[in-house]
Amino acid sequence: MQMPQPDPGALSQKEALAAALRKVLPADAVISDPAETRAYECDALTAYRCPPMLAVLPATTDEVSDVLRLCHQFGVPVVPRGSGTSLAGGALPTADCVILGVARMNAVLERNYDDRFIRVQTGITNLRVTGEVEADGFFYAPDPSSQLACAIAGNIAMNSGGAHCLKYGVTTNNLLGVTMVMMDGEVIEVGGPYLDAGGLDLLGLICGSEGQLGVVTEATLRILPKPEGARPVLMGFDSNEVAGACVRDIIEAGVLPVAIEFMDRPCIEATEAFAGAGYPDCEALLIVEVEGSPAEIDEQLSVITAIAQRHNPVEIRESRSADESARIWLGRKSAFGAMGQINDYICLDGTIPISELPEVLKRMGELSDQYGLKVANVFHAGDGNLHPLILFDANKDGDLETCEAMGAEILKLCVDVGGCLSGEHGVGVEKRDLMTHQYDPSDLELQMAVKDVFDPKWLLNPAKVFPLATSETRRG
């Protein structure tokens, strides 16, 4: 990984910028001690690390504006950071940058139940948004697996989804408006507390832009009334391909579950050892959840279980109580932590057409044999958002490089069958050099032209999204 390295002359720039920042921020909001900036040297893609020049922790939109204005004047790159849960290196610093963390920006600014929205600062965690409105019968739909920790800022940057995105959509489907600060310090408002603002769809451009266009400091989010009820069913199968075919048939039948989650044997075994959820002994399992009135739930589950029976399931276990529902979901919600106990791994994020799921799962098995690395699968099967975990040994020479090569082949496979490189993790540094596999030069040029408009000096979140040689030329 190529990262700009500081030179002796950069020290005076660091000192001058730090002094200027301390004039507009509280003293404890500017972090310059190298021992303390190491806390920001990576995000959840821990294979790559690079301490930033400085880190700042503003608490308001005005403070963010002051920070960006100063960095713009000094010509210093800025890497926005939410909670640091990015799995694609989306918040990885460069050695000459300022990390701008939004952790202190965690206030709820407005609740409006009549118009069904909540306005928040973007440092607030995903799960807390629902926590702020659930007592009044509402919830915020996007639910990434990291929702206990991940910030709304990062959700907007990567257009995050979650287990229930099959029915409710991802962040872009639940984002109504933003306050965003441009690199030169200008504050703009896009959208608002209503659906589909007139004019150009700038909100759709901002959501998923990975911090390339500006720093989102406040967000207006859609909240929904909680459903009358919900119930999952767990289904075990003899192979990944059969489970994938079952998912395809459920979708083709026109049933719309709120979630369809997939786990294969390596993941099942790890979660059983970790959480003891009581999953069946099988090669693959699905968790399918539906919601509505009791009669609606019964009708939907009867259709789903009838489809599953055609695939000779090892077991079908339909929840009959809140405790049983919690047990069914326990292993799935514990999966990433469970896998981390037994192996180093890289979690990929490709998306494919549902019809291609059986073939892609088969091909991933072949790639596993070819590269000699195990793959554990746990993902949002309903919308084809794959999350294969490639297991490797970080202490074994060459294993990381083999893992990355295999991951690149899986992501290329996703594109080749009609899918794309990312569903919700973003491109970051992980997939930037694969962008040419999905986009031709004219496509990439158009995307970069958009960044030129918002960030002419290319100072926001450098070395991400676009192939490195191209972005360095643009910045230079």
Image (spheres, rainbow, N blue to C red):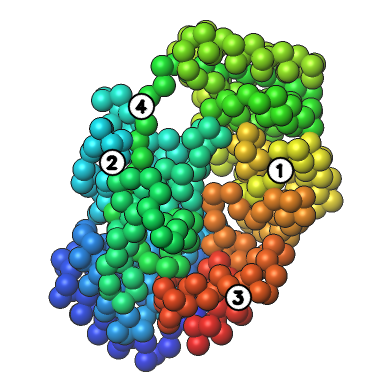
| Residue farthest toward the front in the current orientation of the protein | 198
Residue beneath label 2, please?
118
- Label 4 crowd (10 A; few <14 / some 14-19 / many >=20): some
Report, in whole angstroms, how far the alpha carbon at label 1 lies from the one at label 3. 27 Å
> Looking at the image, which residue is at 53% across and 27% down?
258
Provide the secondary structure element on which disc 1 rests: loop
Report, in whole angstroms, how far the alpha carbon at label 4 lies from the one at label 3. 42 Å
Residue 67 lies, in percent from the top left, at 26, 72
Q: Give yes or no for contact between labels 1 and 2 (Cβ–Cβ under 8 Å).
A: no
Residue beneath label 4, please?
225
Front in this rendered view, residue 121 or 96 = 121
Report, in whole angstroms, how far the alpha carbon at label 4 lies from the one at label 1. 30 Å
Above or below, 321 relative to 272: above
> Looking at the image, which residue is at 21% across and 59% down?
60
Residue 455 lies, in percent from the top left, at 42, 76
Front in this rendered view, residue 299 or 275 = 299
Amino acid type of the residue tagged 1 in the rendering: Pro
Side of 94 relative to 225 (left or right): right
Residue 91 lies, in percent from the top left, at 45, 62
Dot 4 or dot 3: first in sequence order is 4
Report, in whole angstroms, how far the alpha carbon at label 2 lies from the one at label 4. 13 Å
Q: Which mark is residue 353?
A: 1
Provide the secondary structure element on which disc 4 rests: strand
- Locate the N terminus by quadrant: bottom right
Side of 472 relative to 266 (left or right): left
Residue 207 lies, in percent from the top left, at 45, 55
Front in this rendered view, residue 18 or 126 = 126
Whether residue 227 can be seen here: yes
- Label 1 crowd (10 A; few <14 / some 14-19 / many >=20): some
Residue beneath label 3, please?
445
**Which image quadrant for residue 415?**
bottom right
> Looking at the image, which residue is at 73% across and 18% down?
307
